[in-house]
Image (spheres, coloured by chain):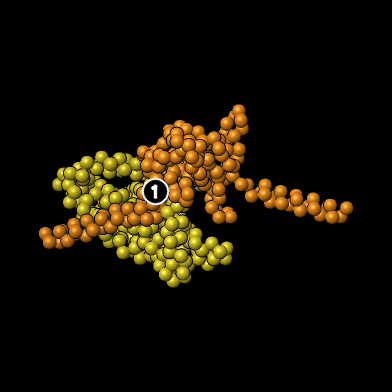
Chain colours: A yellow, B orange
Amino acid sequence: MIELLTQLGEKTRDSFTKLGRSSFFLMQIMAGTMDVLRRPALLSKQLYSVGVLSFFLISISGLFVGMVLGLQGYYILSNFGADEALGVMVATSLVRELGPVVGALLFAGRAGSALTAEIGLMKATEQLSGMEMMAIDPIKRIITPRFLAGIISLPLLTALFSSIGVLGGHLVGVEMLGVDEGSYWSQMQAALDVYDDILNGIIKSFVFGFVILWIALFEGYDAIPTSEGVSRATTRTVVNSAFAILGLDFILTALMFGDI
Amino acid sequence: MGNTVKQDTLVGLFVAIGIGALFFMAMKISNISGISDHESYTISAAFENSGGLKVKSPVVVGGVRVGRVVAISLDQKKFQSIVKMKIDAQYNQFPEDTSASIFTAGLLGEQYVSLEPGGMDDLLSDNSIIEITQSALVLEEIIGQFLFKDKNTETTKKE
């Protein structure tokens, strides 16, 4: 009984110290922002590995998600003779929910895990301590550029995902199933608002990018410097990011669209 | 060196496409170019019943969208619904005896305010109030009247 309590206490203390370390880590990242902005070459390199390399995954996924939405939406809406509203359905679900959430999940799997593994390995091979020996701050040199690159990339990738998804819905709904093209676009334009829908979706993706990058970089930086430790940290990045994205999505949706 | 240039080009392309997608969303998906907030004037109209009219519902004249509803409130003295509308500044030639009605687009579509220009020489200006209004058609009321009427005829037949 006492043992159980001791374990519980230990777990609690562990999670609190981890939270403390990660918050401190986040502040260190933020403190390095100005130094990175003075050296945009570092940022550009990370934008390549975080953003450009996720480009194809996101575009192809967006296309297929949009096409499936077009197909399923058409089957259901045509039951009610409302297949003109297909554009509204596809665009609303993509812009409000699927774009930010699925985009962020894919991004966590594609870029987040890679970042954790990269930084974990840097730590395991003592590259980070090597930098410190040379009086180079590894957080400013390694971590902050990746953090900023991720925060810039994810909203852009989300916008791409949603846009390609709408075009995919158009491809299936209008070109293949014969929904009227004019009503596809005009009903969509009438129903969606720049601030209420699109800006909120982009804000969501900013928040998700922030959280994914924070988790991924911290797990890598905090990993036990062995091959097993790095593999566990990579798994934790994907699992924790997924939880964080889905949980935050509910909270953000309730704040933005609902009257809870 | 060549490698960095190639990377920079791809990064530039990525950012450009991303921003392009943002523009596509703003212009094509949500039509930002519709009615903008700047350069408009406000008029209001008092309806007996504004039905399912909502904030942001369109205001049309002869089928052309000229503005949108910005506020709906209740006049506590007359118990009327006061609908405030923002009209785009380029449409400023409406006579003072313009009348406002609430119509429904299609049988179950969204409700909108339709303005019918009158014939007076004075023009509507900022903060004008439209006097002649026609309330929204509430479907339940019509159905209720219809059913009630039907029952009446049935009972008279029995007698």
Image position, residue B137 (x, y; %): 61, 47
Residue most toward the right? B159
**Residue A190: x percent and y percent?**
45, 52
Residue A228 against residue A40 in the figure, above or below:
below
Q: Residue furthest left?
A: B1
Tag 1 subunit:
B
Q: In the image shown, does A141 or A163 lie closer to the viewer? A: A163
Residue at figure coordinates x 37%, y 55% from the top left: B28
Identified at 44% across, 71% down, the residue is A176
Asked whether B129 or A213 is in front, the reply is B129
Outermost bottom residue? A176
Of residues A188 and A21, which is closer to you in this image? Answer: A188
Residue A68 visible at all: no
The quarter of the picture where residue A101 lies is bottom left
Residue B117: % across, % down? 48, 42
- Locate residue A215 relative to residue A43 in the image: left or right: right
Q: Which residue is mark 1?
A: B34
Q: Residue at x 35, y 53 (%)?
A: B27
Which of the pair A130/A1 is nearer the observer? A130
Drawn side of residue B148 relative to residue B92, left or right: right
Q: Please report the residue visible at 25 percent of the width from the left and 40 percent of the height from the top.
A: A31
